[in-house]
Image: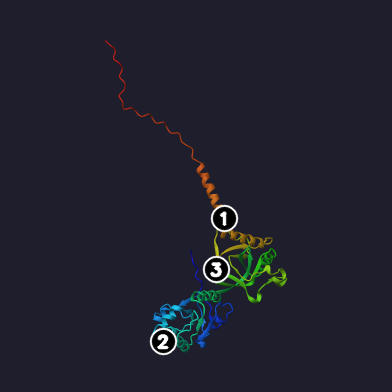
Amino acid sequence: MTVYEPPDDRRGITVRALLEDPELALAVEVVAGHSGVDREITHPRIQKSGLALVGHMHGIVPTRVQVLGETEISYVEGLPPDGQLQAARGLFSLGLSCVVVTRGAPPPTALVHEAEQTGTPLLSCGDRSSAAITALHTLLDERLAPRSRVHGVLVDVFEVGVLVLGSSGIGKSECALELVMNGHRLVADDVVECDYKPPGMVFGEPAELLRHHIEVRGLGILNIKDLYGVTAIRARKRIDLVVQLELKEGDGHYDRIGLDERHRTILGVPIREVVLPVRPGRNMSAIIEIAARHELLRQAGHHPARDFVAQIERATGTGMQRAEPPRQSLPRAAPPESSAPPPVAPRRPK
């Protein structure tokens, strides 16, 4: 199975913003190093810093949240005063974003002293290390997720997140409006804010100022929530399918059977893409509905085009086996000669 790595251009969040975030499911307080609460955390993974206390600094990422649990704190407390100071000085000399001490135990004096000296935020958390790491991972994955902005329309069609792309004025918003009239839900129009979620998923949501709104040429800005109620909107949806609308003269080159595999890469994740030609009289919203249903079949393991081609190949192969070439008449082989001597006629008496 291929694992898609997210891009490296992550955003950062300050320690102050992390502590003030209402979605942080932890009771955390700053014990020392208040002057460094504006340091940035740029990596969503948490790091246990036990080896750094014994002088092994390899692999420590300063922009990660460093966690010291009960085992690490008991090790420091078991050292002589000079050893405690040396261990704390080596850890806090790395320019860390912050250090979290779990279990609610008061940090050793050496850690508090070095945190103040280096301006490194030293935080105390009452929860166990496993609970603290889980809560921090959940929040940092959300806040530090790579993001991009896409010009298009995102609609929830049969629980399939369909991202409709195309040139300006091709009819993306009109398709979305008709899909909403058919009972589907609008996520975003014009601007789709995309963010990466492991492992290999991309979610889309509207820009805050454009939430619930859609622009239809000739009518202007419409509020879908006011027109059709809360059941016609959705705040966020995973992108499962990309529909590219194209307006071309002539026949163009489009998939006639359904065996071609196209993908649109968003934030390092390849998402299946279909290209639909736009022509007068063609019901694009109905075709998008069918594309969403087809994607559900594919996700369930059914591939109608491949099944159809395989059926034709089987039928063709069976027919060729039945058409046997005419047999040629071969000369009959002579019977094998007997090795016994020929019979002797009886001698007549004289």
- From the viewer's perspective, is 294 left or right of 180? left
- Pointer 1 or 3: first along the chain: 3
Q: Is residue 18 above or below residue 274?
A: below
Amino acid type shown at disc 3: Met
Q: Position of residue 291 (x, y in %)?
A: 61, 61
Do we see residue 170 in this rendering? no
Which residue does the numbered mark 1 point to in the structure image?
305
| Distance CA(mark 1)–CA(mark 3) | 26 Å
Residue under the image location 44 percent in, 87 percent down: 110
Instruction: Give the colouring mode of the picture.
Output: rainbow
Q: Nearer the viewer, mark 1 or mark 3?
A: 3
Q: CA distance from mark 2 to mark 1?
A: 69 Å
User: Depth check: 334 or 266 in front?
Assistant: 266
Q: Nearer the viewer, residue 218 or 53?
A: 53
Kind of residue at disc 2: Leu
Mark with earlier residue (2, 1):
2
Between discs 2 and 3, the one toward the N terminus = 2
Q: Badge 3 is on which residue?
A: 201
Q: Which mark is residue 85?
A: 2
Please name which of the two marks, 2 or 3, marks the residue nearer to the observer.
Answer: 2
Residue 244, position in %: x, y? 60, 65
